[in-house]
Amino acid sequence: MISRRLFGCIGMGAVAASVTACVGLDGLSSTGDGEGLSANRNGSTIAHPDYAEVYAPYRGERFPVPAVNYRSINPSLLRQQVAYYGREQPGTVVVDPSSHFLFLVEPDGRATRYGVGVGREGFGWSGQAEINLHRSWPDWVPPKDMIERTPEIQTELEPTPRGLGVRGGPKSPLGARALYLFAEGRDLGYRIHGTTEPWTIGSDVSSGCIRMINQDVIHLYGRAPDGTPVVVLASA
């Protein structure tokens, strides 16, 4: 059962100022550095890709995906393959808000781990869901309660096919990709999505959505098809 407090996808403030959510793991380099446990699910790093390549500008997109200054981000939040000790089956997405990690569980006791931004105080949630919709460069349409909390964002909104919002592209708070979370036959209002503010990864910043570096959400997007189960752990 989903335990949630409020819906929404981005932090407070004007869209332009505070909206906040590649390649494969080719060329993996073994590190073996221990990083402790995250809800008893991950142990030491097994391997990580060449970050200069992974977080370089992403080619072949409708809109630019700029390079990420990965050296300014905590290394534990960068994409890597880790040992995985959880009970979830391969193909499951597991989000650990306390550690700001998202795991894509793989066979043989491994997972690909990504750093994420999660809901700020009062906007956290936990439970089980599944991915039932994918969107590339999605339009962002804020829910009514978000507009009521931050009416100043109305000046940034324009008509989209789904209502007043921000059209998909470099200014969209949903970034390059969005995976829509459903439970009990309905859209929960939460997304796993990209972000225009990669420096917020590792923070409690959103209104409940799970945000990722654009290069990382593109990587996950092709590996988590519709029907993928999602488990969001309770915060410690």
Image: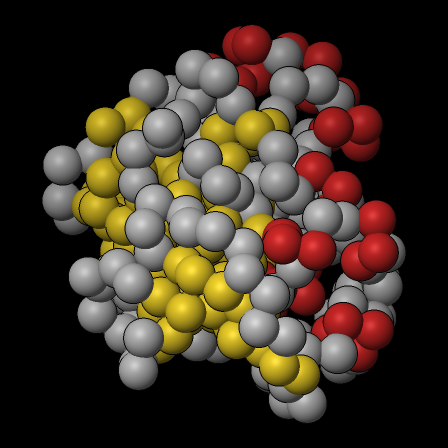
State left or right for residue 68 relative to residue 37. right
Work out whether residue 157 or residue 145 is closer to the camera in this orientation and state it.
145
- Classify 34 as above or below 143: below
Work out whether residue 118 or residue 101 is closer to the camera in this orientation and state it.
101
* Residue 209 visible in image: no
**Residue 202 percent across, percent down from the top left:** 62, 40
Residue occupying the point 72% across, 13% down: 152
Residue occupying the point 29% across, 26% down: 4
Residue occupying the point 29% across, 54% down: 230
Work out whether residue 25 or residue 76 is closer to the camera in this orientation and state it.
76
Quick one: quadrant of the C terminus? top left
**Residue 131 percent across, percent down from the top left:** 32, 58
State left or right for residue 191 relative to residue 148. left
Quadrant of res 149 = top right
State left or right for residue 223 relative to residue 132. right
Residue occupying the point 23% across, 39% down: 127
**Residue 161 percent across, percent down from the top left:** 54, 48
Give the color scheme: rainbow, by chain, secondary structure or one colour: secondary structure
* Residue 70 visible in image: yes
